[in-house]
Image: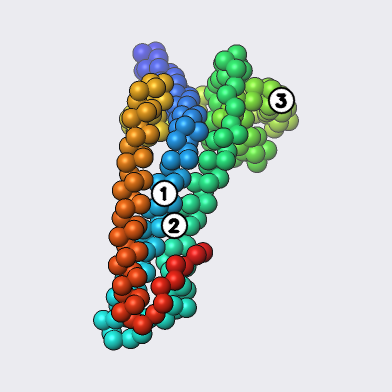
Amino acid sequence: MDELIRKDQDQYKKYEELLLRRDQLQKEAGSIHTAYIKKFGELILEDFELKVECIKKKKMIGFCQAALNRAMPIDLAEMKTFIQKAMALYNLELQEMLGNKKRAEGAKRSPDFQIERSKRIYRRLAKALHPDIHPETAAIPEIAELWTRIVIAYHVNDDEELENLEILVRRVLREQGVKMAVTDISDLEERIERLEGELNEILTTAPYIYAEMLEDPEQVERKKEEFHKEIDEYRAYSKELSDVLRNLLCEGGAEFVWIQD
């Protein structure tokens, strides 16, 4: 019996450590993403804007071709409405990218001592409050709100805020009369397996895989060259599409007008 209890405790501890490891990796991935945007943001944005421009021109060509196939004149006002609807999601994505770039440019790197202190406080709080470990505690509205604030503070390495939140957490738990005990998790092995899969996914995909590249000036330059090459290709393709579009509009009896959003 003691051996079974020890095994359960070991599995629980492993699950707890995997949760903390996943949260740490997600935080690191966020920092890597910020560094990546900081380094390549201008090129990423220019590349995407040209890509969107080409998509827009292709949709305009499709609209014109469909009208000509029906032997109908090309209605520029109708085409503008069609394009605005068709490009709405792309424009939203572009605005999101602009926002990410602005946030990345304003991000500051925290001192190492602040990062380590944040990590220590977060580990204490996560062991006591993490929703996956203590769902009964997470069901308390005040704790749920505090947990959200804890995660945000942890991701920006705000050790002072985490310390304040820890004080608030202790007060709420005391008022609620909650004693933290190990929660019985029936599907512990399945959860551990899923977490190990999540960890592998984080470690082997973007943005985490950019970490090594960002530390190597030669790799950074190669990446910039890749962006420049793709940008040049999009520019050339955009010019080709403009020529096709101009011919179609002339054939359809409409004057060539580039549509601006």
**SS at mark 3 in the image:** helix
Q: Quadrant of residue 217?
A: top left
- Measured Cα–Cα span from mark 3 to mark 1: 42 Å
User: Residue under circle 2?
Assistant: 90
Across and down, in percent, residue 184 comes to 46, 29
Q: Residue at x 36, y 40 (%)?
A: 228
Work out whether 183 lies above or below 57: above
Left or right: 34 as drawn, with respect to 168: left
Q: Amino acid at mark 3?
A: Asn
Q: Residue at x 41, y 49 (%)?
A: 48
**SS at mark 2 in the image:** helix
Across and down, in percent, residue 32 comes to 46, 29
Across and down, in percent, residue 245 comes to 33, 69
- Measured Cα–Cα span from mark 1 to mark 2: 9 Å
User: Residue under circle 3?
Assistant: 164
Q: Name which of mark 3 and mark 1 comes first in the sequence.
A: 1
Q: Quadrant of the N terminus?
A: top left
Q: Amino acid at mark 2?
A: Tyr
Q: Quadrant of residue 106?
A: top right
Q: Amino acid at mark 1?
A: Phe
Query: From the viewer's perspective, is the residue at label 3 or at label 2 nearer?
Result: 2
Q: Residues within 10 Å of mark 2 (few under 14, many from 20)?
A: some
Q: Name which of mark 1 and mark 2 comes first in the sequence.
A: 1
Left or right: 152 as drawn, with respect to 212: right
- Foreground pick, 142 / 211: 211
**SS at mark 1 in the image:** helix
Q: Residue at x 60, y 27 (%)?
A: 108
Which of the labelled discs sits on residue 48, or is there none?
Answer: 1
- Measured Cα–Cα span from mark 3 to mark 2: 41 Å
